[in-house]
Image (cartoon, helix red, strand yellow):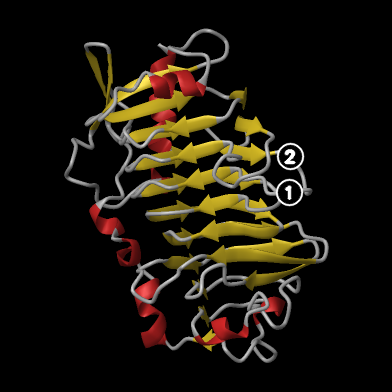
Amino acid sequence: MKIYGYLLIILFQIVYGFIMATDAVNTSIAILIKVDQSGEGDYGKIQDAIDAVPSNNSELVFIWVESGTYREKIVVPADKPFITLSGTHASNTVITWNDDGDIYESPIVSILASDFVGRFLTIQNTFGSSGKAVALRVSGDRAAFYGCSISSYQDTLLDDLGRHYYSNCYIEGATDFICGNAASLYERCHIHSVSESIGAITAQQRESPSEDTGYTFLGCKITGVGTALLGRPWGTYSRVVFALTYMPSAILPQGWDDWGDQSKQSTAYYGEYKNYGPGANRAKRVRWSRSLSSDEVSPFLTKDMIGGRGWLRPVPTHFKRASTIISVNADGNK
């Protein structure tokens, strides 16, 4: 059956999803739902598969999305936790639409539930450069994304609320294209600025020193077609750290901007640690940004900053369809 081939692909991709999982559910078994536009799956649309998950769900649900271009807006409601949405590869599993306006209404994909996992998907808002157009909104706690491509122009990724992890993702935009007040770790991600003039990669929204939020970019790569700032403070206590990250000449020498409010220079926390490339030179950085020591940066360099060791989970090894349980071992044998 074709399903066995799909499960083998998942196992080969397991390097993207690892670490200890939450004890709230049995993380080795998941209910499998297949989405296929050809009519060979359980549903032809992704939202229909999500709608089929019961409210207050307490089991892992693995929604397998067959390759194709899905022209729909998607919402994972707050009362539907423990969903994984997975394609085979971001290049051939595309969720696309175009919308603009309010940043909470325009997203093509909105994750409001906790314990969500997104894998190998392209999520794009094709509205263009004339307004706010969010591709992905993440407002649930304990959300992880592996090998995803997320693209728009302004406010591409509304990394809104909760603790989040992004691994090996591609994120593209121009203006404040990673924004919000989540506590997030971006690890080995490719950040691409398409701004032709002065863009801004981050607009982190931390409002109080008591909030344990902020963005860390660890071992990432930045590219750009014009010039861009590393960030500017949406919130008074905005917090962003770049560590061990490649920075091209597209990064402006000053690095950061106070968004026209000098009072934020004393409250924003913008740190850099052992970055490299022509844009990493700190000689002309704004004086209120920080060159972090190894001791200062250490809390930002592990998944402990998002409590990830307690909730990041591996790919399930057993899948249920109706009353049947399919077991797949690491060597591919059933």
User: Residue 3 versus residue 71: which sits nearer the camera?
Assistant: 71
**Three-letter residue code for mark 1:** Gly
Q: Quadrant of residue 313?
A: top left
* Residue 202 drawn at (x, y percent): 59, 65
Residue 148 visible: no
Point out the residue furthest to the top here. 39
Asked if 103 appears above or below 178 in the picture, the reply is: above
The dot on residue 131 is 1
**Three-letter residue code for mark 2:** Phe
Crowd rating for badge 2 (residues with CA inside 10 Å; few <14, some 14–19, many 20+): some
Which quadrant does the N terminus fall into?
top left
* Residue 311 drawn at (x, y percent): 27, 50
Instruction: Name the residue that disc number 2 marks.
Output: 127
* Residue 280 drawn at (x, y percent): 64, 80
| Relative horizontal placement of residue 324, taking residue 202 as reference (left or right) | left
Q: Is disc 1 placed on a helix, strand or loop?
A: loop
Q: Quadrant of residue 261?
A: bottom right
